[in-house]
Image (tube, rainbow, N blue to C red):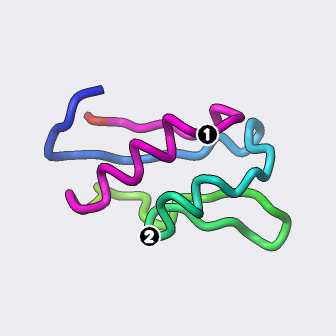
């Protein structure tokens, strides 16, 4: 993964298994709803200061339900 200026994250809802790890790692990027499923709080480009946490959440997601787009 490269560390560019632009970054977006996505959650694949059909893959999410409600582990809540993303929210614990990057609470300013991901939230978990009342049913236990994750969603991205920021759907546009993330501020640079949130990139590291977002990448860690994507890497550590046990269900591989998170994606990062450096485009």
Residue under label 2, please give it. Answer: 28
Task: Please state the extent of the stretch shown in magenta in the rendering.
Answer: 47-69
Q: Quadrant of the C terminus?
A: top left
In the image, is 1 to the left or to the right of 22?
left
Image mark for residue 38: none
| Residue 40 x %, y % | 53, 59
Q: Nearer the viewer, residue 51 or 43?
A: 51
Name the element at disc 1: loop
> Whole-Å distance between the Cαs marked 1 and 2?
16 Å
For image coordinates 58% across by 63% down, the residue present is 24
The residue shown at (23%, 62%) is: 49
Magenta-colored stretch includes residue 66? yes
Q: Residue at x 80, y 44 (%)?
A: 17
Which of the two discs, 1 and 2, labels the residue nearer the N terminus?
2
Q: Position of residue 43 (x, y in %)?
A: 43, 58
Judge whether 41 appears above or below 14 on screen.
Answer: below
Label 1, residues with CA under 10 Å away: few <14, some 14-19, many ≥20: some
Q: Secondary structure under badge 2?
A: loop
């Amino acid at each position: 993964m490269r560390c560019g200026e632009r970054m977006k994250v996505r959650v694949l809802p059909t893959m999410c298994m409600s582990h809540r790890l993303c929210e614990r790692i990057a609470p300013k990027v991901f939230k978990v709803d009342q049913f236990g499923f994750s969603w991205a709080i920021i759907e546009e480009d993330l501020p640079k200061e949130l990139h590291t946490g977002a990448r860690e959440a994507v890497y550590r997601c046990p269900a591989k339900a998170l994606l990062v787009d450096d485009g």
